[in-house]
Image: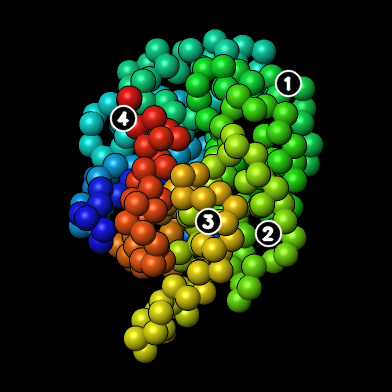
Amino acid sequence: MPRQLAIVDAHQHIWDLAARPQPWLDTSPALAPLRRNFLLAELIPQAATAGVTATVVVQTVSEPAETADLLALAAAGELVAAVVGWTDLGAPSVVDAIAGLRALPGGRFLAGIRHPLLTEADPEWLGRPEIRRGLSALGDAGLTFDLVVRPEQLAAAVQAAAGLPHLTFVLDHLGNVEVRPSPDAAWVSTFTALASLPNTACKLSGIFSAPAARLRARQARDEDPVAHLRPYLDVALDAFGPDRLMFGSDWPVCTLSVSYGEVVSSAIALTAELSDAERETILGGTARAVYHLDTC
C-alpha cells in the first residue's frame, strides 16, 4: 500500500429494511442475498481492516427520508464523510428541497444528488426542461450529480454535461460497462466523449466483482488477479486522468461476488504500476476534491 495511504471509498450503500423497503431488490432473483439489512456497523470493521478511512454513502431509493437518515449517519462521525442523496429534480420546489436537506442534522455532509436513471423508461429524461432546471439548481448549490446509467444512456449524459458546465457530473461504475476481454468500442467512444468535458469525473467502481470466479482462479494460480480489468483502467486513465478518477467499492452490492476486502485489494493491485501520486489521487484524493470531504 503506497505510503500508508488513507483510502476513500467513494461509493457504498446502507439500508435497513425495517426503516424502508428497497423495491429494486425484488427485481431479480440474483439479488436475493442482498435482501437483508446492511448497516454501517457491519462495514466499519471491514473498512478498518482494508485501510479505508472514509466513505461516501450513496442513495438507493427515491425518497427524501432516506437522504435525511444518511445525513444523520454522517453527522454521527463514524466513517461516512459525505452523502450523495436524492431529491425530485423535476419538482418546481427543487431549490427549496435542496435547502431543506441542508438544514437537516448533518446537512453539511450533503455533497451530491443521484437519480436512478437505470430504471427511467424515458431516454430523454436528462433532457427534460424541468430536469435541466433541477440539475442547474444542483450546480448553483455547489452539489454534484451522480450518473448511474446503462452504456446506451451515456450519449444523453454527454449532452446534459455539455449543457450544464457549472455542474460536476460523476459517472458511477464506468457507466455500468460489461467487463469483457477487450472493451466495447461503442462504450469507449461515448465514455471518452463524456470525459472530454471538464465538468465530469468517474468512479472506478462496480467492476471489481466481475467475473469473480475467474479472478479467484487466477489468484489460485499466482497469476495477475486483475489482468482482465487493466484494459478498462487504461481507457479510464487515458480519458479522465487520475485527477478525475476515484475508487468506489459498491458495497454491499459487491458482496454478491466478492468480499469488501477483496474489492479494496483489487483496487490496490490494479493501480500498483502507477506512481505513488497517481495511486493516492485515485484511491483518495479525487473523492476528497470532488465531494469536498475536507470541508464537511
**Mark 4 vs mark 2, CA separation in Å:** 33 Å
Amino acid, disc 1: Glu
**Precedes in sequence: disc 4 or disc 2:** 2
Mark toward the viewer: 3 or 2: 3
Q: Which residue is mark 2?
A: 188
Q: Nearer the viewer, mark 1 or mark 3?
A: 3
Q: Which residue is mark 4?
A: 294
Q: Nearer the viewer, mark 1 or mark 2?
A: 2
Label 1 and label 2: CA atoms lie apart by 30 Å
Using the rendered view, name the quadrant where residue 235 is placed. bottom right
What percent of the width, then of the height, locates residue 282?
41, 51
Residue 170 is left or right of residue 119, and the answer is left
Please provide percent x and percent y for residue 40: 29, 43
Disc assigned to residue 130: 1
Q: Could you tell which of marks 4 and 1 lies nearer the N-terminus?
A: 1
CB atoms at circles 4 and 1 under 8 Å apart? Answer: no
Quarter location, residue 189: bottom right
Residue at 32 percent of width and 34 percent of height: 81
Residue 164: image x %, image y %? 67, 27
Foreground mark, 4 or 3, reads 3
Against 79, is 206 above or below? below
Upstream in the sequence, badge 1 or badge 3? 1
Q: How many residues crowd mark 4 within 10 Å: few (<14), some (14–19), many (20+)?
A: few
In the rendered structure, find residue 237 and report the number of the disc placed on it.
Answer: 3
Q: Amino acid at mark 2?
A: Val
Residue at 42 percent of width and 42 percent of height = 286
Mark 4 vs 2: CB contact within 8 A: no
